[in-house]
Amino acid sequence: MAALVVAVVVTVLTAPPGVAGTAARTDAATATGAPAPVAWRACVEPDLAALGLQCADVAVPRDHRRPHGRRLTLAVARRPADGPAGQRLGSLVVQPGGPGIPGRSTAGMLAARLAPDVLARYDVVGVDPRGVGGSMPRLSCDPAQLAPVQPDPVPAGPAQEAAMLAGAAGYARECAAAHGDLLAHLSSADAARDLEVVRRALGERTLHLAGYGYGAYVAALYATLHPRTVGRLVLDSSLRPDGDLYQHYLDQSRDFDVRAHEFFAWAARHDGTYGLGGTEGEVAAAYHALRARTAQAPVDGVVGPWELEATFLNLGWETAFWPILGQVLADAAVHGDTTLLRLVHQDFGAHPDDTSYAAYTAAQCTDARWSRDWRRWRRDAAATHAQAPFATWNNVWYVAPCVAWPVKARPVAVHGGRVPALVVHATHDAGMRLSGGLAMHAAFPASRLVLSDGGREHSVSLVRGDACVDPVVVRYLVDGALPADASGPGADVTCPAGPEPVPWPAAALSGPDAAGARSHAVEPAPTGPPDAPTAPGVATPWARARG
């Protein structure tokens, strides 16, 4: 199984004013104030205890410009290095995406997949970001914001559009009412500065980071703000470091539409299994007919068009979702059985509360400058939807609170300087375009770029056993050795993509034990990529957040 971030899509940042020149000196905002040393204890949360993790709390300034002011508490976990003391290199922080994905469980699940040479040398550390997971105070603006059944994301007319816009603006107001001036301190730059406090609390001279998706951006910000204390730096599936988040989501909507049609074509090639039709068009028609039915009568009063799209968005993050989503579509569209749809939506499409969404929105809306002109949003959404109807409006509404966010954006430019980072990307990543990896490679002139040629996955390294990518990353983490510089903006190492997924055996989802098998099919296993949704064949703990 797999657990990526069904928390769903993520990424980006605009490069305006910020920290010009920070690559040459330590960020002043976190240069003072000595945190208390970390006091480790056995984790009591069942999921963390099952992974054998140790837990601790680290106090950080609410406002890093006032290091002796009010404090927040970050929940931290580690899997201690298991090699001889003389081999230990330090702490490797796993920074998942979202933004808003809990880091503790992510680190534990990644540690379960890491090579022995890495585990011997590093404490593998995860940090729950501000207000998320075990970090306090916990964020929540409106727990029912994404509760089912949401309106069809494609507006039926001006009245519905106005109501949905009012709902997005209302969420922004509710966040301001619930959290006040804390909203000004939930950016990715704040998260990067928190990592510096964690480094000092750990007693480490340097901090090593593996960032995935939006987490790669946070890791790059740490290197920008603290170039003297960053150690090994893996930036996997990044967005553009100087990106425009507004444009990013329009581009992502187009890329997810392309990926949806690739999924439809794949299901058609396996018509003998799914019975959805032998052409891409027939499978697409089956999906759109199911969507239309959920608009008329939501499945069990829970899955309408919005929820269906949120569930099927996972096909864009990870092809390992394709077999189970193919079965979901076949069951519902061909056999009229929505049991598996309910299960998969519950595990990979639903939001039990708005904690991660609140953190996601607060970071997105302050990391980049967003247009406040809804007429522009409507015009661009309509034009993109006309070309890419699969999930454009769903994406737009997901970030729509930014049109009315009550806190001024404070973008920070990424400057990699001489930091010898390792950048990893799949050429056909629909969640974060290849242009993000190329731009991150350019922002770190001393970096090397590893590409999965033809790869469709979001989060490539150390999570799926890639026989070409992983040895390059492991050697870098263990020895600090970068691959040879091929010169120019292109790849220094090119690896072949993995094979397409294959449908599950019919016996796995049918017969007298079908209900139990189908329930088990959507249970996350202790493995997988740290930045996308969860599905059989991958495995990771970051479901629910877009990035």
Image: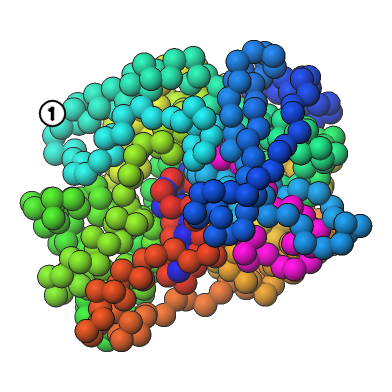
Residue 317 image position (x, y, % from top left) = 45, 58
* Residue sitting at x 52%, y 77%: 499
Residue 328 image position (x, y, % from top left) = 26, 68
- 116 in magenta: yes
Q: How many marks?
A: 1
* Residue sitting at x 88%, y 57%: 85
Q: Is residue 336 above or below residue 199?
A: below
Q: Nearer the viewer, residue 467 or 385?
A: 467
Q: Which residue is mark 1?
A: 159
Residue 198 image position (x, y, % from top left) = 71, 35
Residue 240 image position (x, y, % from top left) = 59, 42
Outermost residue to the right: 86
Q: Is residue 12 above or below residue 87?
A: above
Outermost residue to the left: 296
Label 1, residues with CA under 10 Å away: few <14, some 14-19, many ≥20:
few
Q: Secondary structure at mark 1?
A: helix
- 278 in magenta: no
* Residue sitting at x 50%, y 44%: 101
Q: Is residue 24 visible?
A: yes
Q: Nearer the viewer, residue 35 or 532?
A: 35
Q: How is the image coloured?
A: rainbow
From the viewer's perspective, is 478 left or right of 346?
right
From the viewer's perspective, is 458 left or right of 228?
left
* Residue sitting at x 82%, y 63%: 83
**Quadrant showing the N terminus:** bottom left
Q: Which residues are magenta?
A: 110-129
Q: Nearer the viewer, residue 495 or 176?
A: 176
Q: Is residue 241 visible?
A: no
Q: Identify which amino acid the numbered label 1 is placed on.
A: Ala
